[in-house]
Image (cartoon, rainbow, N blue to C red):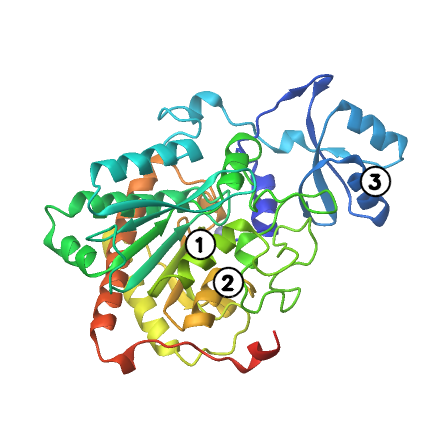
Amino acid sequence: MKKRQAILWGLLLGIGLGLPLVSGPDGPVEIISVPATVDARRALRGMDLDLLMERDGRIFVVAGPDDLLRLSARRITFLIETGSFTAAQPGELRLAGGINGAYHSYKELEGDLESLESAHPSIVGLHTIGTSLEDRHIYAVKISDNVDRDEEEPGVLFLGCHHAREWISVEVPLLLARRLAEGYEGDPAIRELVDRSEIWIVPLLNPDGLEYSINVYRYWRKNRRANADGTFGVDLNRNYGYMWGRDNQGSSAWPDAEDYRGVSAFSEPETRAVRDLFLGGNFLAAVSYHSYSQSILYPWGFTDIPTGKDELLRGLGLEMAGLIETVNGRSYACGPAASSLYVTNGDLADWTFGVSGIPSYTIELPPVDIQHGGFFNAEDEIEGVFRENLPAMLRLVEFVVRDFAGPPTTRPGPLTNPDQKDK
Ligand SMILES: [Zn+2]
């Protein structure tokens, strides 16, 4: 989910943004907005300010007292917007013991993954598939029998948190890893799936962004790339190499935009980590979790032209939506990404589908809209959101197991797209 519309609503509704109102050496730090003019842009870039977002023709930045004086000296008018952002209450955040409550920080996740591996060493393998710009590990959990061996088994990939503020998308894949590991002994259905497949789970692809979202600015979306123009962040889900940068509607060429695609395809260590994991395995399905809007989206994102495999993608997607709805009664819409949500280019599902033709989904978790909380899922909803998604996750694992065992002709093969040849 993006971007300006959600942010606008968040501001209008005064939703708690978790922004600590820190004090600088000379006084409080404010959030201000300035008109997005050429002069203002130039001035802001020269001042090394922390750009938060741009919407409705205004640029929002974090500024200290000195910065405000410098802006005044440059005759740039600004509005103090701090009051529109409600500070998070530390007490609320620490209810469940962590800095962000029941949600995981990077360190908490790391600890939990290590514990999971040491409690179930025969079926859980913890791998570091890359290192973020701020030197955090990008973890992938492999769950399979003979987990240390690379067996002739089909792979399925579950990924969370391309987008920092979508905290629920860390928890759902993490809980899947835990459920598979803990259910292996006592649940024959889980045992069979784990024995016959290699399930890879990357719960937190964007650790730098998540930490920034927890500690500095709740609405942060991108990674923390220091862009050449002084702004921060690349939208990881616009940085993959299939139809990357195809147009400026599906991603942005501007570094200060929320959907900035980066300087080149796979310019970011996070997307390279996914690329290398994926190309080194035998993946027959992939799901990328996001929030919010309750939808199951399949390729293409970059165009509304059908893929040629829509029957398979739609059939499996509708089946997953049906399984989800039976749990809590929540309905997830299902459709091709470009016509369901908005056009995107360079996202993960288009890339995995584009290079291998496998069923690839973006699942937007609850809530359904901003009025129901947007990016803010209550802590006590985590378990319910996971539980409703579990049957769909297991169905996808079952799909790859059966598909792998079936006649080779039914197996997805690499796709060629006439458009791709000159890309
Ligand atoms: Zn997202």
Q: Which quarter of the rendered picture does the C terminus lie within?
A: bottom right
What residue does disc 2 label?
341
Residue at the (53%, 39%) spot, across then down: 208
Ligand 1 within 8 angstroms of badge 3 C-beta? no
Give, as a three-letter code, the residue at label 3: Ala
> What residue lies at 28% left-to-right and 82% top-to-bottom?
409
Give the foreground label among 3 and 1. 3
Mark 2 surroundings: few (<14), some (14-19) or many (≥20) residues within 10 A: some
Which residue is denoted by mark 3 in the rendering?
Answer: 43
* Residue 92 versus residue 369 in the image, above or below: above
- Residue density around tag 3, few if under 14, some if 14–19, many if 20 or more, within 10 Å: some
Q: Residue 322: percent from the left, percent from the top? A: 27, 63
Percent x, y for residue 395?
Answer: 24, 62
Give the residue at the far front of this rendering.
Answer: 149
Residue 100 sits in which quadrant?
top left
Query: What residue did someone put label 1 on?
Result: 293
